[in-house]
Image (spheres, rainbow, N blue to C red):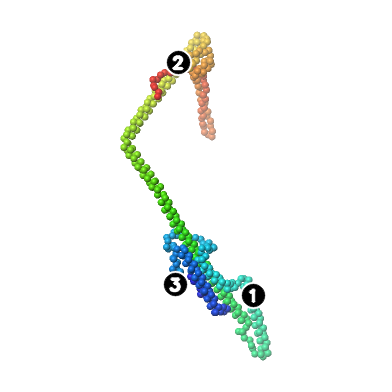
Amino acid sequence: MTKIGYDQVKPNIATEGSAISQSSNEEEKQKIDTAIGAANIASQRAENVHMRQNGAVPTFQNSTAVVSPVSSILPIEQTPPPTVSSTTPDNHKADLIGYDNQIDILKKAQADYASANETEEERKKREKREKSKRVIAAVGDGIRALSNLYFTSQYAPNMYNPDDTQLAKVDARQEKLKAEREANRDKYLNYSLRIGDLENDRAKTVREMEAQAERLRLAREKADREQEEHKWLADLQPDKKREQTAKADAADSVAKTKKVEADNADAIQKAKLNTEKERGKTERTKQAVNNATANLRGAQVVESGAKAANERAGAAAHYAAARASDRSNVSEFSAYDSKGREHKFRTKDAADAYAKQHGTFKEENKTEKTTTTSKVRGRTSSRVSTKSSSGGGYSQKPPQKKSTGVKWK
């Protein structure tokens, strides 16, 4: 923060025709310099207090405070500066009192030249007054010239002086007032610019203070996190030690198991081979038993078929002999019970019913195939339907059970 005096804020314009005297300028300069000097001292003290609180060390060179920021002393992570709010935080008011005092002084000095900022209505009224004064002055000059002409025609001396007119005086006064307005406007503008610069510097200082406070806060939080992390690591050391011990024990157990397996690899391999051999023998035995059973069933089926054929042939021969002798046999139909004993019946229906009751009836199915040809969209398709119907049957003697000599396990 630099000192701002009257020489830096006064306008650099021509003061020709100004109504402010040299003595009033000197008094105003002394007042402003005194107030700004006091504001600078208070601001410097507040800054030194703030820097000491944040850990920075102020050094003085030629009455100018040089602050060593904390960021150059402590290694702090670089973070983007935070957004500064429109309102000043309470903890920075004491640090910004120098800026506030200077801005207040400049605003008070600026208020003396506020009249230079005319509104549109005020400007029109002023121009109307100036025009009226010029018209009145011109009319007066005309009357004066006419009167001088009249008296001159009466042989009076010519008293008319074209340089000494009311219009010239009015124009000179208006030019003087215009120069004063422009000078005041320039002063007002210069004060406005200086106030704007101070407000910008003040906002920049606030941002820097908040950024520095944010960096300090982040550094403290990082240190706290690191300290807490170290504490957690210290607390986890017993668990890590137990985990490493468990891993070592597991690895030792695996190594011992592999050693035992390696030592007994031959015995284990022999046992596996013996097991596979026994399994192969068992499978071959089962296969032999299954083959014998299948052969037995095939022989039984062949025997049953031959016996049924013999019975059908005997029945046919019997029927033929009966027809040949032209005699009537009362019980000419036979049926077998479940034990293979034959029974005689007068009708075939009675014999079939008895055979069905004892499970010795064998049905004969009749199959009819029908082929249907159809033509759809130029394509010919054939469909074959099969229909099965019962074609009667006969009583078949059940096969006798025989011993195979195979012991079932």
Q: Which residue is mark 2?
A: 310
Identified by mark 1, the residue type is Lys
**Disc 3/disc 1 C-alpha distance (Å):** 57 Å
Residue occupying image coordinates x 52% and y 67%: 97
Sequence-first disc among 3 and 1: 3
Nearest to the eye among marks 1 and 2: give it: 1
**Disc 1/disc 2 C-alpha distance (Å):** 154 Å
Q: Which residue is mark 3?
A: 62
Identified by mark 2, the residue type is Asn
| The C terminus - image quarter | top left
**174, above or below 51, in the image:** below
Residue occupying image coordinates x 66% and y 82%: 140
The x, y position of residue 356, in whole percent, is 51, 18
Identified by mark 3, the residue type is Asn
Residue occupying image coordinates x 52% and y 33%: 379
Nearest to the eye among marks 3 and 1: give it: 3
**Label 1: few (<14), some or many (≥20) within 10 Å?**
few
CB-based contact (under 8 Å), mark 3 and mark 1: no
Q: Residue furthest bottom?
A: 155
Q: Which mark is residue 128?
A: 1
**Disc 2/disc 3 C-alpha distance (Å):** 145 Å
Whether residue 394 can be seen here: no
Q: Quadrant of residue 293?
A: top left
The x, y position of residue 236, in whole percent, is 41, 49
Sequence-first disc among 1 and 2: 1
Element type where label 1 sits in the image: helix
CB-based contact (under 8 Å), mark 2 and mark 3: no
The x, y position of residue 246, in whole percent, is 38, 44
